Amino acid sequence: MARIENPSWFTTKQIEPHLFLTTENHFFEGNRSNIWLIRGVARDLIIDCGLGVCNLKKHLENLQLLSKDRECIVLCTHSHFDHSGGANHFENESKVLIHQYDYDGLRNGRQVETLNYVKPTHFSQQPYQHFSTWQYEVPSTKCEPILDGHRIDLGAGDEVTVLHVPGHTRGSIVCYYPKEKSLFTGDFVYDCGHGGNLFDWLPTSSVQEYLRSANRMLDWLQEHDIDKIYPGHFRILNGPNRVREILEQYIDSKDGCCSKLTASCLQTLTSGFFRSGCFRLCPC
């Protein structure tokens, strides 16, 4: 018997003439990812693909935003469940790309790298009848590894360039779209409305790499004209100023051994937490 999915699970809205944002509004806002669709001249690009509890591909096809007659490429900014969970719905008909350092986690469905952190209280509505968080996982997904500088051709010279920004995960990336002077930042940087919100203490995070990436990005922003920042969570940012502020605050917050030690201790705890699956026992 075919699974009947919640018809209101996804919400999609047009942001720019060729840019669409999809969200999973019945999932906890703190982990609710922004799913971006760029409709290129010759092919489409999806940047991140949500939890995978409902079929994103079918949803976008029903809206006539994807077509079997047009190539679609899926790009995951990193391997965490809220960004890569839906990639398996595309693997048979589309190319799924992820940085080589996060490739093994998605290709082999490794929980410590995909995190799979869902709890019953994270859902205001069920994605489908008899859904269970105990059964949720990011499945092994056929994908291709990419490197810093990889370019995705959308047709007629329209390209998106991948920039490697390790820290949140070893393979975290941001995507530069020069045609629209825009940057898609995944979980590397976003604005949740208060400071100290960048996650550098997860099992595959690195404070040292995050700091290097933050400094490199500040230099990069000085050299490029950016009008819009499209993050992996929360609101769209106009211009680079808020991103600079967040990155500078992050760098300042890590000035000293105490903050680095705190992050290291948290990382040790969370690594055991996810490897053991203890989060599934939490009743909250």
Image (cartoon, rainbow, N blue to C red):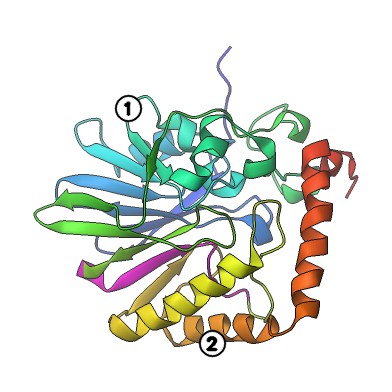
Q: Quadrant of the N terminus?
A: top right
Indicate the position of residue 154 as horizontal and vertical percent values. 19, 50
Is 224 drawn above or below residue 282 in the view shown? below
Residue 49 can be seen, yes or no:
no
Q: Residues within 10 Å of mark 1 (few under 14, many from 20)?
A: few
Q: Could you tell whether 130 is left or right of 250 in the image?
A: right
**In which image quadrant can residue 5 be found?**
top right
Q: Could you tell whether 50 is left or right of 121 in the image?
A: left
- Under circle 2, the secondary element is helix
Indicate the position of residue 169 as horizontal and vertical percent values. 58, 55
Is 47 drawn above or below residue 57 in the view shown? below
- Tell me the residue at 64%/62% (across/down): 206
Residue receiving disc 2: 245
Q: Is residue 80 magenta?
A: no
Identified by mark 2, the residue type is Glu
Label 1 or label 2, whichever comes before in sequence order:
1
Indicate the position of residue 202 as horizontal and vertical percent values. 70, 56
- Under circle 1, the secondary element is loop
Q: Residue furthest left?
A: 156
Residue receiving disc 1: 93
Instruction: Give the alpha-carbon distance from disc 1 to disc 2, as whole Å.
Output: 40 Å
Q: Are marks 1 and 2 in contact (CB under 8 Å)?
A: no
Residue stretch rendered in magenta on the structure: 179-192
Residue 231 can be seen, yes or no:
yes
Labelled disc at residue 111: none
Identified by mark 1, the residue type is Glu
- Tell me the residue at 65%/68% (across/down): 207
